[in-house]
Amino acid sequence: MIKGLAGASIWSEDLKKNLLPFYRDVLGLTVRIDTPGFVVFGDAEAPSLALGTHSQVHGRNGDASRHMVGLVTDDLAKDWRRLKDAGVKFVEDPTDYTNVKLATLEDPEGNLVQLLQFASRG
């Protein structure tokens, strides 16, 4: 039986050139595993995001809407402002969809990433 998501991967022609510095240094994700061609972010208890170098991937993503990675934040407005000030390109500014607020950004290779802040339950 499939139980849920273990993680997601984004493939690159050269992950160390653009993607690793962006996800680690700009977004601020914590590297858990770092090998020459593959990096995993996050802790072992939660689904993880991985970046990898792949021989079949060349250049920027030609269809950025095909998939999106979602990253959870506890302060969307603060993270949006920090990233916007750092020059990150947003394709959707913070928007409130009742149970979730989100903003969508583009990484250096054209992949879309959503920042999600879920409504508190109480």
Image: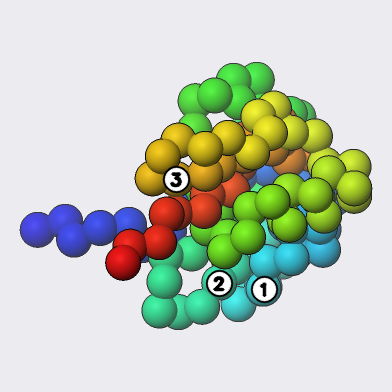
Residue 15 visible in image: no
Instruction: For marks 3 and 2, give the one nearer the viewer.
Output: 3
Image mark count: 3
Going by the image, does 69 lie left or right of 35?
left
Q: Which mark is residue 30?
A: 1
Q: Residue at x 74, y 33 (%)?
A: 90
Q: Residue at x 25, y 58 (%)?
A: 4
Q: Which residue is mark 2?
A: 42
Label 3 packing within 10 angstroms: few (<14), some (14-19), many (20+): few
Q: Position of residue 72 (x, y in %)?
A: 52, 58
User: Which sits earlier in the primary sequence, circle 3 or circle 2?
Assistant: 2
Q: Judge by depth and name the residue closer to the eye, 15 or 79.
A: 79
- Between 110 and 95, the one lying in front of the other is 95
SS for tag 1? loop
Q: Amino acid at mark 2?
A: Gly
Q: CA distance from mark 1 to mark 2?
A: 6 Å
Question: Callout 3: helix, strand or loop?
Answer: strand
**Residue at 60% across, 77% down:** 32
**Residue type, label 3:** Val
User: What residue did someone put label 3 on?
Assistant: 100
The residue positioned farthest toward the top in the image shown? 62
Marks 1,2: beta carbons within 8 A: yes
Q: Residues within 10 Å of mark 2 (few under 14, many from 20)?
A: some
In-image side of 72 versus 60 (left or right): left
Residue, far left: 1
